Amino acid sequence: MANAPVTAGRHTPVSRYLRCEGRELHYMEWGTPDAPPIVMWHGLARTGRDFDDLAQALADDYRILCPDTIGRGLSQWSPDPVAEYQLDFYARLARAFVDGLQLAHLRWVGTSMGGATGMHAAATTLRNRISHLVVNDIGPELPQPAIERILAYVGNPPAFDTVTELEAWLRVAYKPYGWQSDAQWRRMAETSVRRLPDGRVTAHYDPAIAGQFSHHPNDYNRWSGYDSLRMPLLLLRGADSDLLLPDVAHAMTQRGPRAQRIDFPDCGHAPALNVASQIDAIRHFLATPAAPADTRAH
C-alpha cells in the first residue's frame, strides 16, 4: 500500500543545541554517534521535526541530525534578517553545524529550501564533503507563480485561538505534502506552534523569512552551482508539484550530477517523506556506493 504508515521504531531522539555563526541552532539527533551521519534540512517555513518518520526509519543505520534553520522552530531568530535569511548564510550555517559536530563527510537529505541549501552548500561551503545528496522537490530555478503561492501564507501566518484550529489550517496549507495520518498531522501542528502575546497561536517561525524573495530575488537561480556537482544525487518530486516543474526536473537529470529522478503520485510540493515508498527509495539510494557522479556512465 503506497500510503502505508511507517511502523514506529525503537529510537528516541535527543533534543540538542549548537552555536553556529554566532546563532543558536536547535536540532534533533537520532541513532548512534559512531554511525554514518545524515543531515536532514527542512523546507522554508517548517522545522526539523518534519523528518521524524524518515529519521526513525533510518536510525538503525545512521546518525541523523535534523536542525531547525535560523528563524524556525526552536532555533534563534535572526537579529539581521535581510542579511541572514538567504541561501549563502544557510550554507555557512550548514558548514558551521557540520564542523561543530566534527563531521568530515556526510549524507544530506533536503526538502524544498533544505534541498536548495544542500545543493548550494555542496557547491561551496561543504564542497567534497557531501557523499550523497537527496533533493526533495526543488531545482536550480523556481517558477514565480509557485513562489507567490507560498508567500501568500508564509509572509503573513494567521493566528488562531486554539491548536486544533491551527492544525486545520495546516491541513489545507500543506495538503500538497500528500497523505499523512491523523497522528502525523497532529504532530505537525504541535511541533509548528508558538503562542503570541495575546494568547493566540501561530506557526513557529519568523515571518521575516519571506523577505528572502524580495531582498534576494535571484537566490534560487543556481544552475551554475548545480552544474559543478559530481556526487550521486537523488531528485524526488511530487507528481503534481508546482515548484519543481517537469522540464526543470528533466534538465537536472541531463546536466551537472545527472540526478536519478523519482516522481511520487498523489502529492505536490513537497512529498512528506513519511510513507514506505518514499522512505524505501531514500534508504536504497543512501546505501549505494559514494562514487563520484563523473565516474558513472552518462
Image (tube, grey):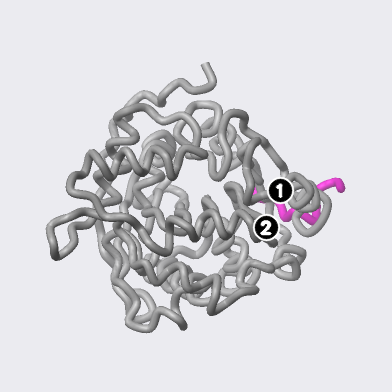
Main SS, magenta residues:
loop
Quick one: SS at disc 1? loop
**Image point (63%, 47%), residue name:** 242
**What's under tag 2, amino acid-wise?**
Pro
Q: At which x and y percent is residue 18?
A: 30, 68
**Image point (59%, 33%), residue name:** 281
- On screen, residue 297 versus residue 154, left or right, reads right
- Magenta segment: does it hold 40? no
Residue 143, disc: 2
**Image point (26%, 61%), residue name:** 74
Relative to 51, does residue 82 appear above or below in the rendering?
below
Q: At which x and y percent is residue 185?
A: 33, 35
- Magenta segment: does it hold 292? yes
Q: Residues within 10 Å of mark 2 (few under 14, many from 20)?
A: few
What is the magenta range? 290-298
Between 191 and 201, the residue placed more toward the observer is 201
**What's under tag 1, amino acid-wise?**
Leu
Residue 245, disc: 1
Residue 184 figure quarter:
top left
Q: Earlier in the sequence, mark 2 or mark 1?
A: 2
Between 127 and 26, the residue placed more toward the observer is 26
From this viewpoint, is residue 41 visible? no
Mark 2 touches mark 1? (CB < 8 Å)? yes
Relative to 64, does residue 44 appear above or below in the rendering?
below
Residue that extends furthest to the right in the rendered view of this protein:
298
Q: At which x and y percent is residue 211?
A: 47, 73
- On screen, residue 219 versus residue 4, left or right, reads right
Relative to 298, does residue 103 appear above or below in the rendering?
below
Between 182 and 175, the residue placed more toward the observer is 175
